[in-house]
Image (cartoon, rainbow, N blue to C red):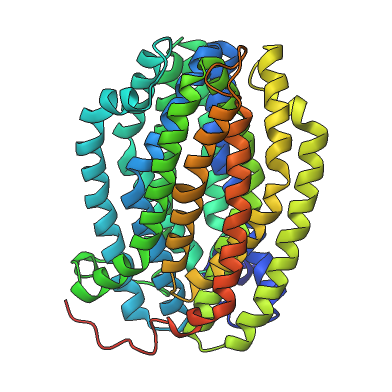
Amino acid sequence: MLKRINVLFGAQDMTEGKPMSALLKFSIPLLIGNLAQQMYSTVDSVIVGRYVGDKALSAIGTTLPIINLLLVLLMATSTGAGIMVAQYYGAKDKDSLSRSIGNAMTLVFISSLLVMAVGIPLVSSLLKLTKTPVETFDMARSYLTTILWGVLGLGFYNIVSGILRGLGNSVFPLLTLLLTSCLNVILDIWFVAGLDMGVTGAAWATIVSVAVSAVVCIVKLYRMRDVVRIDAENLIPCKKLTGQLLRLGLPAGVTQAIFSMSMVFVQALANSMGYQVVTCTTAVMRIDGFAMMPNFTFGMAIATFVGQNVGANRMDRVSQGSRDMLKVSLATSFVLVALLSIFGRYLIGMFTTTEDIINLGVRQIRILAVGYVAVAITQVYGGIMRGAGDTMPSMWISMFSTVVIRVPLAYLLAWFTRSETHPQGSPDALFFSLLISWVIGAISTYLWYRRGTWKSKSLIPSSAPLTA
């Protein structure tokens, strides 16, 4: 019995056994965990929308691109750490693995403090930059400020859960998320509905729950002494490892920054259309978060699988596992398209009872639905390249599909669809531009994958003894 528990909650070696079995064993708990994580923000929106109103829901939606932009450093650190952990674990290099994890934790601590120091004083300026409607400005400022005070817990949860996934352990982060998601629901209802704290209460519920998750995952990692050693020595920054982490993570961070900046500009366009459009867009993007989650999960799973097998020099398994993951991802996307087409109205109705907003939301969901097939292709092939250590292509593709295509196209479509009903343009412009950018991103990612340059990007062949 003890052995089974250790297998379930310990690190998973994905360099052995059938690739499909290893991927599914890792992906299913990871998917459930990611869905639970998405519940944090969704529960906030549902409870705020129902108990406080459409304006409060609009206020939360206004802050999302800004939050994502400010968390770029944490995103970069987490991505770089995940790739390094997977490859060093696959190579059975415990010393480099331990020092990589220690360096990542130190870096995320510094990054979190920097985000708080820079972000909190700039909250009002950032909201003005995105043309936040005056009706929702004060609520948005309160929500964003509170969330930023909790960045340290968010940073540590993301980095440590990412490290555990790099080790092949997706079950423990899942159980942690399920428990803290329940805590988040309880605190949301208590703070928002019970104590009448409004959007600030929703923010406090989120940061308290995430902080609990972070502490639990850190304790778990510290106790995995048979796999990794976390001590003061490994927390001291190592020049080579920090350089590797930044080399691998910064492209992902730049990608996130580019995407977030584009979303800030698109958010400004949405804000100019009125708070009801923002309310609708917020609800749609919450649903989109759930619809995207299987694709993101499969991308993370194949990145870990490829990382471990590249580290172990098992390129035959990389090829087979990649084909298997693509089949699963595409099949899941087709099912999602069908479900969203059927249940879109009911899903939007969870957030608001305003009929005009519901009708607009249903139309926007149908515009995006087909795009999830394109995203499946992007995530799988992008995950293969990231796992192998080739993180630059995603950055360039993201820059092209968002900066060159999505943002200008959104404004262009809005300009062409101006009318008496929609003087700033049709809200559909926001989502048609997103759909087109997804399709272009999928085509570009596949073509870059076919070039095959990612096969020579492994850390392991060039690794030398590490010195601080």
Compare residues 202 and 289 and report the one nearer the observer.
Answer: 289
Residue 99, image quadrant: bottom left
Q: Measured along the vertical axis of the image, is residue 246 above or below residue 118? A: below
Q: Is residue 237 left or right of residue 256?
A: left
Q: Residue at x 38, y 53 (%)?
A: 75
Q: Position of residue 129 (x, y in %)?
A: 32, 27
Residue 141, image quadrant: top left
Question: Outermost residue, front direction?
Answer: 416
Q: Residue at x 61, y 68 (%)?
A: 446
- The reply to whether residue 170 is in sight is yes
Number of numbered discs visible in the structure rendering: 0
Q: Residue at x 50, y 75 (%)?
A: 307
Compare residues 310 and 438 and report the one nearer the observer.
Answer: 438
Residue 433, image quadrant: top right
Compare residues 352 and 448 and report the one nearer the observer.
Answer: 448
Quadrant, the C terminus: bottom left
Q: Measured along the vertical axis of the image, is residue 11 above or below residue 56? A: below
- The reply to whether residue 212 is in sight is no
Q: Position of residue 71 (x, y in %)?
A: 35, 44
Q: Measured along the vertical axis of the image, is residue 300 above or below residue 272? A: below
Q: Is residue 137 left or right of residue 309?
A: left
Quadrant, the N terminus: bottom right
Q: Position of residue 445 (x, y in %)?
A: 56, 65
Q: Position of residue 12 (x, y in %)?
A: 56, 72
Compare residues 354 and 85 and report the one nearer the observer.
Answer: 354
Q: Measured along the vertical axis of the image, is residue 133 above or below residue 282? A: above
Q: Is residue 74 left or right of residue 293?
A: left
